Image: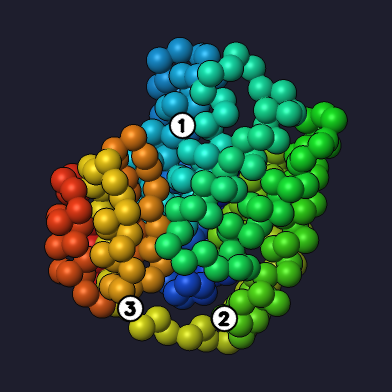
Amino acid sequence: MTYAAGLTEYEEILNDLNVFPIADHDTGTNMRITVAGAANAARRAADDSLHAISRAIVDGAFRSAQGNSGVLFSEWIRGFCLPLDRIVSADHSVVSTAMRSASESARAALANPVRGTLITVAADAAAATQGVTDMVALWRGASDAARSTVADTPNMLAALSHAGVVDAGGAALELLFDLAAGVEPVERFRSHGCPTAPAPQTKHSHEVIVVIETNDITKLREAWSGLGDSIVFSGGSGVWKCHIHSREPNAVIDAARGSGRVVDVEQAPH
C-alpha cells in the first residue's frame, strides 16, 4: 500500500483523532490532499532520476499543502528530500540523514513548537534511524519509535488526554513509517481510540494560508507572532507558504503584504 492510499483508507480515523491544535477534525483530509499532490507531481517528474523525482515531490507537496498539518508535513517532506538532491541512489545512511533533516525542517517551520505532536514523533523516529546497518532495520526502527511516541502523546498534551486520543499528525506520520516497514497498521490505529470528551474550543476563528515571495521570512514571522497561533512557515528559495489561525484575518493578510509579494491567499472561518 502506498502512503497516499493509506491516508485515503485511514482518513476518517485521523480526522476523528484531530483535537489539537483545534478540534476541526481535518488532519486526515489535509494530509491526504498534500500527499496526493506530491504523488501526482512525482509521476510527472522530468525523468526517473532521484533528483528529478525528489524535486517534483517537494514542489507538489508545497503547492497542494492544506491546513496546519499539510503545510507542516510539506516542510517535513522538503527536509527529507534535501539530502537526495545531488545523489544517484539512496542507501540506509542517506535515508537516515534525510530523516534527521526532515525532523529539523519541520521543527524550524513552527513559530511555537509543541511537544507531543508530529514534530516529536519525527524527532524520535529520526533518532531511531541513526547508526542502523540496513534499510529494513531503519524503517522498522522508525516505525517502532513512532508507535511508542504516538502512544505517549496524551501524556504530553492535556488536550489529547482530555479527549482520550493520540495526536493526529503524529499518527499520520506513524502510518508512513508503518507502511515503509511493512507493518500492518489496522489494529494499531484502532487501539488509538476515538474522542471520549469534547475538546476545548479554540480562541481563534479564521484559518489563513498565504503564499508569499520574500527573501527574508523573518519579518513575517515577527509580524504574525502576536496575531494568532498554529503558525507554520514552509518553503524557501524566496517562496513560502504560511499558515495561521487568527481572530484578525485582515491584519494577518496586511502583515503578509508588508513583508513581501503576496501570491495567493486562502482564508476561511474555523
Can you tell which quarter of the image residue 149 is in? bottom right
Q: Is residue 263 left or right of residue 130?
A: left
Q: Circle 2 — which element?
A: helix
The answer to whether residue 26 is seen in the rendering is no
- Estimate how packed mark 2 is, as few (under 14), some (14 to 19) or many (20 or more) residues with alpha carbons within 10 Å: many
List x then y, in percent, for residue 213.
23, 42
Q: Earlier in the sequence, mark 1 or mark 2?
A: 1
Query: Is 126 in front, or is 208?
Result: 126
List x then y, in percent, for residue 108.
49, 53
User: What residue does disc 3 label?
Assistant: 204
On screen, residue 24 above or below 93: below
Give me the residue at 69% from left, 63% from top.
150
- Estimate how packed mark 1 is, as few (under 14), some (14 to 19) or many (20 or more) residues with alpha carbons within 10 Å: many
What amino acid type is highlighted by mark number 3? His
What amino acid type is highlighted by mark number 1? Ile
Image quadrant in which the N terminus is located: top right
Q: Which mark is residue 159?
A: 2
Q: Earlier in the sequence, mark 1 or mark 3?
A: 1
User: What residue does disc 1 label?
Assistant: 57
Q: CA distance from mark 1 to mark 3?
A: 32 Å
Give me the residue at 50% from left, 27% from top.
54
Q: CA distance from mark 3 to mark 2?
A: 16 Å
Image quadrant in which the C terminus is located: bottom left
- Estimate how packed mark 3 is, as few (under 14), some (14 to 19) or many (20 or more) residues with alpha carbons within 10 Å: some
What amino acid type is highlighted by mark number 2? Ala
On screen, residue 246 above or below 4: below
List x then y, in percent, for residue 204.
33, 78
